[in-house]
Image (cartoon, rainbow, N blue to C red):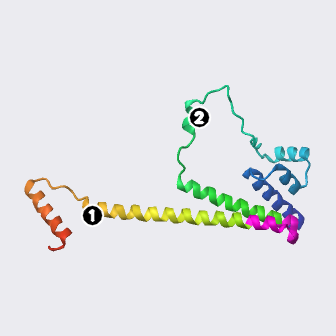
Amino acid sequence: MAPKSDARSRDIVAQAKLLYDAGVTPLVEVRAMLGMSERAFSSFRKSEGWPMRPSPIKRKSTDTPPTPERQSAAPTQKEPRSLIARLEEAVEREFLRAEVALATCGAKAAPKTMETSARVLASLVRSLAELKRMNRDVAVAREEDLRVRDAFDDEPPRQLAELREELARRLERMCGDGPAE
């Protein structure tokens, strides 16, 4: 059985990795969580195989015009499922951030920080629920549309007499006067 400190340190490293990968938490906080200096964290990151995070500063490149490959790579419209996945990831990150704040500060955490975290979580959960409801409504509407189409997408008659008979049957069904087949 592993000692508790080893299990706890693995949990802390796992949480730090999640925060590091999310790219939202500043490196200073991740290093403080692990109790490492900048140089120690750099060597730890390399030894653990953590990829280098991109720079938070977005630089404009004035010397190279956008190529067709770059333009086609940028998605013009987001898929609703990917939005749901991204919102779920944001909820998980916020929960992790709140857990880390509670673990490091304990019960003496700043009330303002906890209130802000709670508001962010509530907003994310509401948005996620609304997006899932909208997807469900769209799926139901598509299903109903397909049922309506299937009702009228019969095989077309080949002969003129068959066409007249089929048209008469459909008119009777629509008006409700004749027998339904």
x then y, percent, for residue 56: 75, 43
Which region is colored magenta?
102-117
Name the image quarter holding residue 119. Answer: bottom right
Between 178 and 130, the one lying in front of the other is 130
Determine contact: label 1, label 2, CB under 8 Å. Answer: no
Query: Where does the image place residue 132, in percent across and percent down from the top left?
Result: 54, 64
Residue 3 visible (yes or no): no
Residue type at tag 2:
Arg
Taking depth in this image into account, of 39 and 111 the one nearest to the observer is 111
In primary-sequence order, the first of circles 1 and 2 is: 2
Instruction: Report helix, strand or loop for mark 1.
Output: helix
Q: Position of residue 11 (x, y in %)?
A: 81, 62
**Image quarter of residue 149:** bottom left
Relative height, residue 105 to residue 80 (above, below): below
Vertical side of 60 occupied by 19: above or below: below
Q: Magenta segment: does it hold 53?
A: no
Q: From this viewpoint, which residue is outermost toward the left?
A: 161
Residue at x 58%, y 55% (from the top left corner): 83
Q: Is residue 69 above or below residue 52?
A: above
Q: Gap between marks 1 and 2, in whole Å?
A: 45 Å
Badge 2 local density, few (<14 within 10 Å), some, or many (20+)? few
Circle on res. 151:
1
Which kind of residue does numbered mark 1 sit on? Ala
Which residue is more in the foreground, 24 or 159? Answer: 24
Q: Residue at x 50, y 62 (%)?
A: 135
Dot 1 surroundings within 10 Å: few (below 14), some, or many (20 or more)?
few
Q: Considering the image in quadrants, where does the C terminus appear?
A: bottom left
The rendered magenta stretch, by its main secondary structure, is classed as helix
Report the quarter where the N terminus lies.
Answer: bottom right
Q: Which residue is mark 2?
A: 70
Instruction: Looking at the picture, tell me which residue is in the foreground, 97 or 14.
Output: 97
Q: Which residue occupies 87% across, 44% down?
A: 43
